[in-house]
Image (cartoon, rainbow, N blue to C red):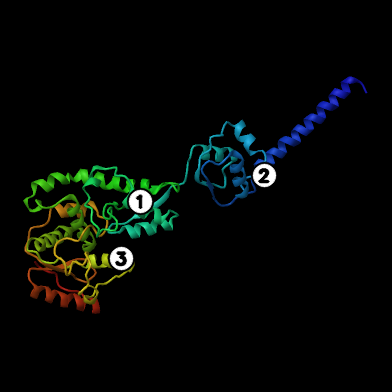
Amino acid sequence: MTWFWRIFFTFVLLAGWGVLGYFYVDFTLGSPKRTKPVEVEIPSESTLQEIGEILEQKRLLRESTFFRYYAKWKNQTNLRAGTFEILPNETLDQILVKIAEGKENKVKIVVPPGWTVYEIADRLEAKGFDKKAFLEALNNKKPRYAFEHKIAKSPDRKYKLEGYLYPDTYYFKPSEKPEEIINTMLGQFNAHYEKLNLEQKLQSNPRLKNMTLDKVVTVASLIQREGQDKQELPRIAGVIYNRLDIRMPLQVDASIVFMYREQGKKVTRVYQKMYKGVNHPYNTYINYGLPPGPISNITMEALAAAVNPEKHKFLYYVTREDGTKRHFFATNFQQHQQYNAISKRNREKGQAIPTNGE
């Protein structure tokens, strides 16, 4: 065999092995057919080899042997930690780009109006966040906004940021720290607080001369939990201030619900036996003045009502129980009792009732 043929066959052999090697590597870096999205979690400080093994375990690669070399060849070695959703049609190149750019999936968290920190913590836990760490951060995190320094400190308040986690729809990364989650919610509160120009309203309204931001937020939380019709919020606020003016217990059922929630109990309806003789700082049936702090988060409408209460002489209100989510308002106890009777009949029979007419 001449030297030419030796070189030729050597070249063919090497080329053949090269082609086989290429297809083998290409095969191992491919993945079995996928029909559903795959969630991949990349821990902090993971090496390329470890990331390759994770992708192999998730069946996004057939074999991870050549992954780190491929990533280096593609200049995609700065891969980030996080949780990523890999779609069925995404190639390895697209997966590398997604992880390198840190395109984590964001988790949707809906925080409705009138929720407590307990309910928010439960919602976060259901979405994969650390509930205990979140609750601890409510008291331990460093203040970011100026209003946080105005929140009253009280041994009767379990979580000082109760009431300030603004209701909204949020999107958080799965790796988001509790402090970051809390600051995002506080940021929404701060934006509405500044938009309302609340500090100026406190100074300009003689009726609010003894009120602080924290007290106003507490009033707003009572309004938020008691009223479901936005048009009634200023009127309910007026009742609360009327009672405060004459040193009359507020007797807000929502505060009793919160009182039991603080003890780990959930109640939906308040009865006399639940508060009569019960010594608790949030028992507004036996204590005068406002409770130690807010009892839920608040909307801007509730906060606006708290600084712009309706002027009237009402001291009582009771839900109509007619499906309208509105209330009867009364100036005296006798009238209130009459409305109570109508409300009770409505609850028992579900029949329509006449309007208040006040």
**Which residue is disc 3 drawn over?**
261
Which is in the foreground here, disc 2 or disc 3? 3
Q: CA distance from mark 2 to mark 3?
A: 52 Å
**Which residue is disc 2 drawn over?**
63
Q: Earlier in the sequence, mark 3 or mark 1?
A: 1
From the viewer's perspective, tell me whether residue 301 is left or right of residue 116.
left
Are the residues flagged by discs 2 and 3 in contact, CB closer than 8 Å?
no
Q: Secondary structure at mark 1?
A: helix
Q: Position of residue 226 (x, y in %)?
A: 21, 63
Which is in the foreground here, disc 3 or disc 1? 1
Question: What amino acid type should be assigned to the residue bearing mark 1?
Answer: Ala
Depth order, front residue of 279/228: 279
Depth order, front residue of 348/240: 240
From the viewer's perspective, tell me whether residue 1 is left or right of residue 246.
right
How many circles with numbers are drawn on the protein?
3
Work out which residue is located at the far top of the displayed protein and give it: 3
Q: Earlier in the sequence, mark 1 or mark 2?
A: 2
Depth order, front residue of 190/259: 259
Q: Quadrant of the C terminus?
A: bottom left
Q: Position of residue 77 (x, y in %)?
A: 56, 34
Q: Quadrant of the N terminus?
A: top right
Q: Residues within 10 Å of mark 3 (few under 14, many from 20)?
A: some
Q: Position of residue 357 (x, y in %)?
A: 10, 68
**Which residue is disc 1 drawn over?**
137
Q: CA distance from mark 3 to mark 1?
A: 19 Å
Q: CA distance from mark 1 to mark 2?
A: 42 Å
Q: Position of residue 74 (x, y in %)?
A: 59, 32
Identify the residue shown where x is 16% and y is 69%. Answer: 286
Work out which residue is located at the far right of the displayed protein and give it: 1
